[in-house]
Image: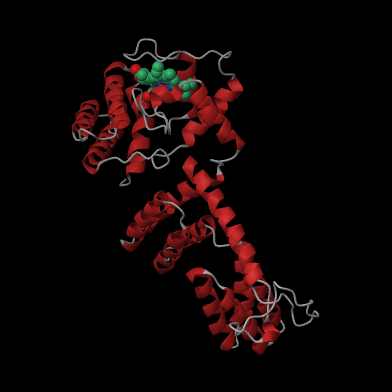
Amino acid sequence: MNLKHRWIWMGAGVLLLLGSLAACQQAPSPAAPETPAPATTKENIPTAAEEVTPAFQVASFQDALVKAKEAAAAGNEDEAVGYLQAALELAEGEAEQGLVQELLEDARAGEMEEVVEDIETYLQSGEATLETVLEEALEAAQAGDEDRVLHELNEALKVAATEAEKGFIQELLQDAAQGDLEEVAEDLEIFLNKRAGGIGGPEVDKAQQLYIQLGCFSCHGAQYEGSIGPIVAGMPADEIKAAVRSGFPEAEVPMPAFSPQQISDEDLELLADFLSRLTLDDIGVHIPEETANHLQLAWEALEAEDKAGVEQHLQAALDALPEDGPEGLRVTLEDLLEDLGEEEEWVEGLAHHLEFLVGASGDH
Ligand code: HEC
């Protein structure tokens, strides 16, 4: 999501990799019972601290689960329990520990099919990444299973890497606790779509480069948060493309038009697509509550095509912004008020902007 977050994710990936390399070195000898033990080397001398029965020694957590699954599938309860105990030793974090403890309970109760199934599901889903956990939460929300939603969201909180992600999940937890599972499902869907939609990769790098090279950042904010020009994040791509080609020569701070020599159609497509996918969360704009409330009312007035109502609430939303409030948001609201006065197609002209601001302010 947030561009900075990509680096954090990559950093986390590297740490995980280093962590698992280290874990491999500390792990018990990789000798499985059916393979002969390799020569003892510096790396695999078993230490006294290891309590796993030698017969169930494994190379990794994953390995332990695979062996436990094989044993369970063969109906060998003791062996399954042995490998699960080995997995418990290697489990990192509460999510893994919780999983293994549940598996152990099932194995001890002789429910081998259950064990096989759960391990398969886990191995297929790979590591418990934020996406996979949130996908589970979405499924549960759609099924109306509040307990499971709360459980999955709490799991998600453990794997969330950034404050923005944690904040998002906290909000979902609140909605879920109030039984508003529809809202939870809706927000999760948007979040997961955005991620799958590829905010990331070379296209994003290119789009960010264009945004800097062409000087958009100097008027629309280095973090897309708005500045002397309005927030353009979240606008429909077509409108962005049209605005870039036409410019706003009449505006108080005139925006130049950009010709195909300055930015090709192809690159403009990329830039517009990128900008249109950004959320308020991505650009770090927090809308103060009172302003958010008035924006919501302005939105409702817009839906009722009540122009005077829209104007009144937009003005109130603007007035409610604190002095040091987000400057880009102030400029954006001023811009919207101006457009309202000028544009004949005021409903369409305003709808996307307001929807973006209201949608992300949470309560509709
Ligand atoms: C010199 C300052 C400046 C630069 C550079 C600039 N803009 Fe703008 N832009 C503005 C201003 C001011 C407005 C508001 C015009 C108005 O509505 O009166 C605007 C409006 C827009 C809008 C329409 C917003 C709306 O609410 O309808 C889009 C989209 C946009 N700019 C995108 C871009 C992109 C993309 C770039 C870089 C390729 C860029 N701008 C470069 C100042 C600038």
**Rendering quarter of residue 28:** bottom right
Q: Is residue 55 visible?
A: yes
Q: Is residue 183 visible?
A: no
Number of numbered callouts drawn: 0
Quadrant location, the C terminus: top left
**Rendering quarter of residue 279:** top left
Q: Quadrant of ligand 1?
A: top left
Q: Give the camera-side residue of 58 and 74.
A: 58
Where in the figure is residue 321, as x and y percent of width and height? 22, 35
Q: Residue at x 39, y 31 (%)?
A: 352
Q: Give the camera-side residue of 194 and 296.
A: 194
- The answer to whether residue 199 is above or below residue 26 is above
Q: Residue at x 56, y 49 (%)?
A: 10
- The answer to whether residue 141 is above or below residue 58 is above
What is the image's colouring?
Answer: secondary structure
Tell me if 206 is positioned left or right of 152 in this view.
Answer: right
Among all residues in the image, which is located at the extreme top? Answer: 250
- The answer to whether residue 90 is above or below residue 126 is below
Among all residues in the image, which is located at the extreme front? Answer: 42
Where in the figure is residue 190, as x and y percent of width and height? 46, 46
Where in the figure is residue 122, as x and y percent of width and height? 60, 68
Q: Give the camera-side residue of 192 and 23.
A: 23
Tell me if 68 is positioned left or right of 340 in this view.
Answer: right
- The answer to whether residue 91 is above or below residue 262 is below
Where in the figure is residue 52, as x and y percent of width and height? 62, 84
